[in-house]
Image (spheres, rainbow, N blue to C red):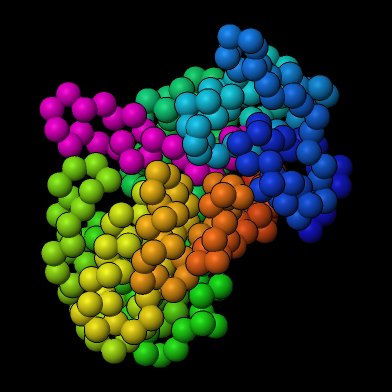
Amino acid sequence: MLLQNAGIKLFSAGSNNDLAEKVSKELGQPLGECRVGAFSDGESSIEIKESVRGADVFVIQPTCPPVNENLMELLIFIDALKRASAGRINAVIPYYGYARQDRKTKARDPITSKLVADMIAAAGAHRVVTMDLHAGQIQGYFNVPVDHLLGGPILARYIQPILDENTVIVSPDVGGVLRARNFATSLDLPIAIIEKRRQKANVSEVMNVVGDIENKNVVLIDDIVDTAGSLTKAAKVLKDLGAKEVYACATHGVLSGPAIDRIENSVIKELVITDTIPLTKEKQIDKITVVSTAPLLADVIKRVSEGRSISKLFE
């Protein structure tokens, strides 16, 4: 899939250079020259080293940890492109940080997902491309077009050869039922649901399992794995209730704090994540498999540039 004389420019703002390079290779389009650094006091510094005047520019920058630093670099990069007279600025944000702060759960809570959306639009982005938002309504927080991509089909293609008809897809909570149902439908498998009660942030208590998982292989499906507390506890409950092998799939592997130790010592046989967030060397363990989103992102970038439908990719 090559782009020739398409009038586009592709940049990496630095938070996931490996993914950007894979997308560049898929497109046959070199990454633009830029410098992402910092002044001595810690302020982010961006320098775009080639003309972008009138170009259709795509800047790849998941706002993964360190979230605030990567978000600020994205905003400055967009502003630099705007002031350099780029024709259209497309922010490709495979992982959208602050997505979990999408509503008020108690008095005086901020809705930070909306704040970040406003900041990206104010900086000058004309379009946002992202993947598996924690809450679908975040698309409505933007005043610019949003292409919301799905990681489920990528994960399903990897996991399908491992599974058999004696497998159940499991949602780790009630809020993820739609995601689990879509995943199960694509694999023609039944679903089950784990009911849990979250006591406070990053701590949860599994209460009950709705569905038949006894003597079956199970696949837990979620959008984000952060500290892995919920995931590993859910896996243990499934195993205790008679499940055979426990697999897990998630689009975004944040894997913060004790996540790696928890996964390593859990009953999970394999955790499959995508490369929306780079997996650093110290987090690379045998139980974790990474599948790439680069072919999908490259196809979407080409379709956006050519004004073609994105939804057809998921039909």
- Place residue 181 in its image quadrant: bottom left
Task: Kindly tell me whether residue 28 is visible in this rendering.
Answer: yes
Identify the residue shown where x is 58% and y is 27%.
74
What residue is drawn where x is 39% and y is 70%? Answer: 268
Question: Can you give x and y, in whole percent of width and height, for residue 254 in the image?
Answer: 46, 47
Q: Nearer the viewer, residue 268 or 25?
A: 268
The quadrant of the image that shows the N terminus is bottom right
Q: Residue at x 50, y 44 (%)?
A: 95
Q: Is residue 216 above or below residue 204?
A: below
Is 102 on the left-hand or right-hand side of 298? left
Q: Is residue 182 visible?
A: no
99 falls in the magenta region: yes
Q: Is residue 112 above or below residue 314?
A: above
Q: Compared with residue 251, is residue 189 higher up or lower down, i.e. above or below?
A: below
Query: Residue 285 versus residue 186: which sits nearer the camera?
Result: 285
Residue 150: give x, y in percent of width and height: 49, 57
User: Could you tell me which residue is drawn at 14 percent across and 54 percent down?
Assistant: 197
Give the mark count: 0
Q: Is residue 225 depicted above or below 77 in this figure?
A: below
Q: Residue furthest right?
A: 5
Q: Which residues are magenta?
A: 90-113
